[in-house]
Image (cartoon, coloured by chain):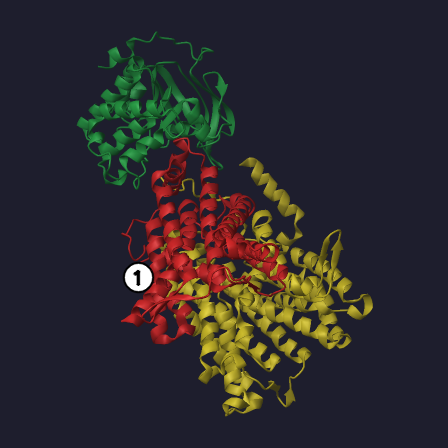
Chain colours: A green, B red, C yellow
Amino acid sequence: MSGEATSAVAPSASAGAPSAHLRLDGVVSGYGQIKAIKGISLHVETGEVVALIGANGAGKSTTLRTISGLLRPSAGEISFEGKRIDRVAAHDIVRMGISHAPEGRAIFGRLSVLENLRLGAYQRNARAEIEQDLERVLTLFPRLRERVKQDGGTLSGGEQQMLAIARALMARPRLLLLDEPSMGLSPVLVETIFRTVIEINRAGTTILLVEQNAAMALQVARRGYVLESGAVALEASAAELRASDLVRKTYLGEA
Amino acid sequence: MQEWIQLLIDGITIGGVYAVIALGYTLVYGVLRMINFAHGELFMMGAFTGYYTLNGFEKHSSLNDSVPVLTIAIAIVLGMVVAVTLALVMERIAYRPLRRAPRLAPLISAIGVSILLRNIMLRATNAQGKVYPKVFPRTAVEIGEIRLLYVQIFLIVLSFVFLGLLYLFIQRTKAGVAIRAVAEDRDTASLMGINVDRTIMTTFAVGAALAGAAGVVYGMFVTTATSGMGFIPGIKAFTAAVLGGIGSVPGAMAGGYFLGISEAISTKFFGAQYKDVVAFVLLVAVLIFRPWGLFGKREDKRA
Amino acid sequence: MKGSGSLSSLRAALDPGRYWSRAGEQLQTTTSGAAVARFGQYAVLPLLAIAGGLGPSYFGIRWTFAILVIVMYALLRSRSGLFGMVVLGAMLVYLPHQMDTFERGIMFDIALYALLGIGLNVVVGYAGLLDLGYVAFFASGAYLYALISAPQFGGGFDVGTSFWIVLPMAMVLAALVGIALGVPVLRLRGDYLAIVTLGFGEIIRIMINNQDGVTNGPVGVFAIPKPHFGSTELSGPVELYFVVLAGCFVAAFAAERIRDSRVGRAWEAIREDEDVASSMGVNTTAYKLMAFAIGAAIGGGGGVIYSAKQSAVFPSDFNLDVSINVLALVIIGGMGNVRGVILGAMLLIGLPEVLRDFSINIAFIHLDNLGADYRLVIFGAALVAVMILRPEGLLPARRRQAQFEPADVLEPEVAT
């Protein structure tokens, strides 16, 4: 299932063609004095699914939070579609086309499912298009359609995850940042979620995916980066990563 | 029986004022987790604006007599404008720089703003209360032994209107949903494209507008404006917000009426001079036994 | 990391006060003789407080005060206690005789507020509990003495000695009131505590006002006798000022000793992070109550002295402004240390008195009686300014600066 998902995109191994969709160059970031990432460089090309894998505390979420503007890097550059975004406020980055479905789902528990979804399209104004997209994501996630009136907090874990992804899509992003979409979900649900991720990518959205479930992530992604204590330890195609000793031992749990 | 109805009406009258002010506390607390100690002073500034406006009309025209609806409306709008302006200035100068500071810092800053405003008005008025011109007939509607001043009816109706409008604003408008989102999770809200700073300002502005309007109407009701008049209603309104579960909009409304009615009834048993004590006892009791409010559900402690 | 390390060592090298404080800590751990030396070091602090009214016959009161504040700020900052002690000890003996009644009154007020500040500082500065109803304890002390000693209530006590009996009684009473208030509310978060104590201060005033039968209501209590010391009646402001001074001395010494003890470390832990403190096994409620009780006792003692000085007390003496004055001087002076409180008392209580009828006339701004009428306006603005520009106060406590550094290091997430 994974191979077909990404075969449409021509491979570009050169680390950092100037045309890169998203590009991080020596980015250092974290909370206060504690730097969770220490000089990360990576790039994502248009149409790709790229996986960031690594252990807890390797800096995966910090990387995403820095890209989406929740954290400000203390060094390095981030550019998106050729524009510098490392000094842009989070709410303006959404407007530029990056949408971030954060770790732990982070849906608004006291807002209804519908309100959550509409918030995803907060910065957009074209009403008809928003309604269209609403229809589209509800088709993508039929479970949510049954629950549009319910408060977000009453949803199950899997439903909340669907809501978080659906909400991120409501921004009509060109780049989607997904943080641990499989966390805490049953294997069946994980399968569903990842199938949807592939669908989203096929529909034209570039995806940067953070996962602890490396097996799953590397099935979906075309390329991947392995992060270790805040730095890129390895960068390769998904197939190569799956075959590499480091990944097999550390993240795939193979002997 | 009639006595009880009278008490109930008096309670609803003052309760409406508490409810309208309480919304400001609860909204700001919702987005910033901070008690805006200076909120009662916005109410006071509203009352003074109302006085100066109505007094100006009284002195320079006969509009107060011919079209009181117009002058009152202008006074209310101006009261709101003044309160909103002040609130935005205080947010920008005294609170925003402290957004990342430890809890005590914005609290102390807010106390400073409250002291500042109160004493500026004390000096500006030479410590003299300002007496409102007579805009409403000082007569009452009497049904049996129940007395209802015209201004009282006006106040009751207007509080309902404001509460209704605010509820619609919070529930139905995009800005309202943004406020609720920021209240729940500031970071995730900004990932939705919500400008958190602007939303916080909107929150202050909405709370201040209500407090300013309440100040004007309350000023007409008690017929005077004094620099210290925001203090007790401010604490009462805060109590109302806590009674309803701070952060909850419907809770603040219900808490306001609950407190107003409890106070009114308490005067029957303890006399009017202990009415403030009743409010504080209620506040302490709720904080100890039901810190999540009388009407709300217990929620897990959030960061 | 490296950079900040060398920066802090640079700061240490530039700041002589650090050496002194380090020496002080060493002394404390060695001998009991050192404890006496340390006691002496604190003796200077209340002495500093009273210098506000000194030497006015020479330069006029305003200039004297201005010079003194500057000198004192320097002395307090560097903690060169010995030098200051000698200079000010001499001034203390000499200068009250140079002053008129008004100036002696100012000295009394500064010292009284310094005493209250030392008490409130235990609560706000050490334990980090924002108490906006401190006046309640002050009032309970003042009324206890008034009711026991004033002739209108029978005056069953031996007037000459009752003061010295009532003083500890008032302190115990205030401490009990503090505990009674503290038990229900100390479980609450900081901002709730602030508003509950605020309400409590008001309730006490309302009760005094309304319980005519007990307190004579708004009419007040009159002809409160002066204390005697041996056979001397301590009647004037200077004599009573010496009483407050002694009070400051004892309170400051006790407070700082407690702060440096196990109790003080518990307070510090609670102040920094209550949840962590309690998970480390600190009985947070007990320690918070202790801070509340100690602060209250000092406030109650201050009330007794106030009552004796004024000869008459009224409910209106005990309004919110008292709590605000004390809180402001603690915060502006520098939370968490006695030196800051002293400086705060001089600036916030002394300066407005000295500038009572000072006027500003610039362009269209005409402000008359600056010190008398605008002091609270200025306090309000100063509280905001201090929080934004220098949240640790003018004279920061050396160990507490961390509390007011940006919180994002410790609390990365507001909510998730």
Residue nearest the observer in this picture, A29 or B275 = B275
Q: Chain of mark 1?
A: B
* Quarter of the image with the N terminus of chain B in it: bottom left
Residue nearest the observer in this picture, C380 or C149 = C380
Residue B32, compared with residue C271, is above or below; it is above
A159 sits left or right of C66 in the view: left
Q: Residue at x 40, y 56 (%)?
A: C189
**Residue C30: in sight, yes or no?**
no
- State the residue lying farthest toward the front: B66
Give the image quarter of residue B8. bottom left
Residue nearest the observer in this picture, C149 or C255 = C149
A139 sits left or right of C95 in the view: left
Q: Position of residue A227 (x, y in %)?
A: 38, 24
Residue C199, compared with residue C274, is above or below; it is below
- State the residue lying farthest toward the left: A188
Circle 1 Cα neighbour tier, 10 Å, few/some/many (<14 / 14–19 / ≥20): few
**Residue B141: in sight, yes or no?**
yes
- State the residue lying farthest toward the right: C58
Mark 1 = which residue?
B289
Give the image quarter of residue B183. top left
Residue nearest the observer in this picture, C204 or C7 = C204
Residue B66, compared with residue C226, is above or below; it is above
Q: Secondary structure at mark 1?
A: helix
Q: Position of residue A248 (x, y in %)?
A: 27, 20
Q: Position of residue B202 (x, y in %)?
A: 46, 41
- State the residue lying farthest toward the top: A10
Q: How many marks?
A: 1
Residue A98, compared with residue B188, is above or below; it is above
Q: Position of residue C129 (x, y in %)?
A: 46, 59
- Which residue type does callout 1 highlight? Phe
